[in-house]
Amino acid sequence: MTSVSQKNLLKLAEENRRKGDLEAAIENLEEALRGEHSLDVILQLCELYCANKQEDQAYALIKEEPDLFSDQRVYRTYCKILMQNHFLIEALQLKNITGLNLPVRVEPVSEQKQQMIMQAFKQKKQINQTDYESLHKLNLVNFKAFVQSILLDPTPDFAVRLALCEDLVRLGLKEKFRIWVIGNLEEFIPAGTLLLEKETKYQEIISAIGSRFSHNPSQLPLMIGEMNLVMGSLYPKISKYVDEPDSFASDLVSFLQHEDGRNHQKLFKQVYQYIPK
C-alpha cells in the first residue's frame, strides 16, 4: 500500500524529474520510504538511482524485497539493475534458478576492469560486501578461474570461501572444483551440491540445537552462531564430515561449554584451528 503522504511525495518527485532535478526527486522518494514500505516508491526510486548513476544503491534497495520473482514489475526492475551494474554472474544465476531468459542483456565490465577487480580483491585483507559483489561483474570464464584460485588458497577465511562456493552452486556448474576444507584438499561439483541452509544435515543440527536450548533461549543465538561457523567451515563437504546430526550437535555443545567434543573432539579442534580468533 502507498499512503497519502507517499503519493504526495511521488508527485513531487515526478515534478523534480520533469525539471531535471534528479537529486531532489531522489530525496523526496527516500523521505517517502522512511518508516513505511511502498513498492511503488521503491520501484520509482530504483529507476531514479539508475538514471543518476547510483546503480549500487538501486541494487541494495531492490535486494531488500523478499520476493524478486512473482511480481513482474519487481522482476523486470531487478533484471534492469543487474544490467546497469554489469552483474553478469548474478544474471546467469538467475537464469539457472528460474530457467528463464532475462528480459535484458547483461554484459560484464571490460576485460581491463575485470583484471583490476580480481587484483584488488586478492590484495584486500578484509573483504566487505561491495568487494564481494564486484566479482559479479566478471565474465563466466574469469569468474570460474578466479574462484578456483581463491578456493585453493588456504588463507581466505571460511566466510569468503562459503560465499564463493554458494555462487558456484547457484550457477549450477557441472565441472569439478577443488577446495581446502580444514586442511584437506577436497573436490565438489556445484550442480550436485545444495546451498548450506538447504543441506539436510545442517537443518537437522539447527533443529537439534534449537530443541536443546528451548529452555534457555538466551544461549541459543550464541550456539547457533558457533554452529554456523563450524558448518560453514565444513561446507561444501558437510556429508563427509558430519555423520549423525543429533550426536554431532550434542558433541558440539559439549565442546563449546566444556571443551569436550567427545566423539568429535578431534574434528572440532581441527575446525577451530582454521577459524580466526
Image (cartoon, helix red, strand yellow):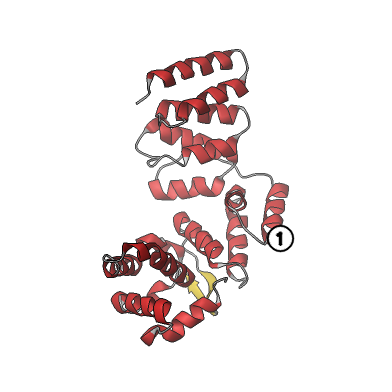
Q: Residue at x 56, y 37 (%)?
A: 57
Which residue sits at x=40%, y=49%?
A: 97
Q: Position of residue 49 (x, y in %)?
A: 57, 30
Q: Quadrant of the N terminus?
A: top left
Comparing 260 with 175, the one in front is 260
Pick whichever, 165 or 38, lies toward us.
38
Task: Tell which of 238 and 213 is nearer to you.
Answer: 213
Q: Residue at x 56, y 21 (%)?
A: 25
Residue 90 percent location from the top left of the image:
51, 48
- Under mark 1, the amino acid is Gln
What residue sits right under mark 1 in the picture? 123
Whether residue 222 is situated above or below residue 43 in the rendered picture: below
Quadrant in the rendering for residue 83: top right
Tally of marks: 1
Q: Tell me the SS state at disc 1.
A: helix
Determine whether, in the image, residue 89 is placed left or right of residue 201: right
Which quadrant, please, contains the C terminus? Answer: bottom right
Q: Residues within 10 Å of mark 1 (few under 14, many from 20)?
A: few
- On screen, residue 15 above or below 220: above
Tell me if residue 103 can be seen. no
Residue 86 as seen in the image, left or right of residue 61: right
Whether residue 46 is visible to the viewer of this picture, yes or no, is: yes
Percent position of residue 174, x then y? 46, 63
